[in-house]
Image (cartoon, rainbow, N blue to C red):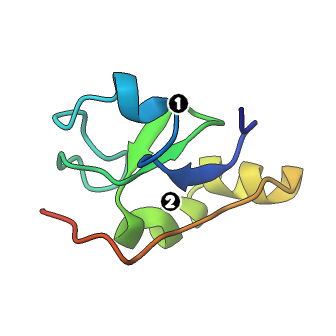
Amino acid sequence: MPCGGIYPIKGSWVEKVHKDSAPCWVCQKPNCTHFCYEWDTPLHARCVVAFLQSEEGECMIEHGHLVVVDYSEAEVL
């Protein structure tokens, strides 16, 4: 299980329990495709950069967590 990073939801254990209606940390819209394990929150691929620029995201960078972003899936915003 990943610890602290950001990874695609598809194919992960989160996919089984994640609700599409859960809002993105950054834009507050549903249908997220990624999950931040450090803060237990969903994100859209297009919102990852903005998240990493936040105080919470900077904490992840300082801790050296891995960030994997898959832009191949269409996101419905």
Q: Quadrant of residue 64?
A: bottom right
Of residue 8 and residue 58, the one placed in the foreground of this image is 8
- Residue visible at 31% across and 70% down? 73
Q: Residue furthest top?
A: 17
Residue at the location (46% across, 31% down)? Answer: 14
- The quadrant in which the C terminus is found is bottom left
Q: Residue at x 40, y 42 (%)?
A: 42
User: Which secondary structure, mark 2?
Assistant: helix
Number of marks present in the image shown: 2
For the residues bearing labels 2 and 1, Cβ distance under 8 angstroms = no
Left or right of 67? Residue 22 is left
Q: Position of residue 35 (x, y in %)?
A: 48, 44
Q: Secondary structure at mark 1?
A: loop
The kind of residue tagged 1 is Asp
Q: In the image, is residue 5 above or below residue 49? A: above
Residue 37 in picture, x, y percent from top left: 61, 36
Residue 5 placement (x, y as % from top left): 69, 48
Q: What whole-number distance in Å separates the C-alpha atoms at marks 2 and 1?
A: 13 Å
Residue 7 tag number: none
Where 68 sits versus 34, above or below? below
Percent position of residue 16, x then y: 37, 26
Q: Which mark, residue 40?
A: 1
Amino acid type assigned to the residue bearing label 2 in the image: Phe
Closest to the observer, 13 or 77: 13
State the residue lying farthest toward the front: 11
Looking at the image, the residue that sits furthest to the bottom is: 72
Q: Nearer the viewer, mark 2 or mark 1?
A: 1
Question: To which residue does mark 2 refer?
Answer: 51
Q: Where, quadrant-wise, is the N terminus in this rendering?
A: top right
Rendered residue at 24%/33% (across/down): 22
The crowding category of the residue bearing disc 2, from other C-alpha atoms within 10 Å (few below 14, some 14 to 19, many at least 20), is some
Left/right placement of residue 66 relative to residue 63 reads left
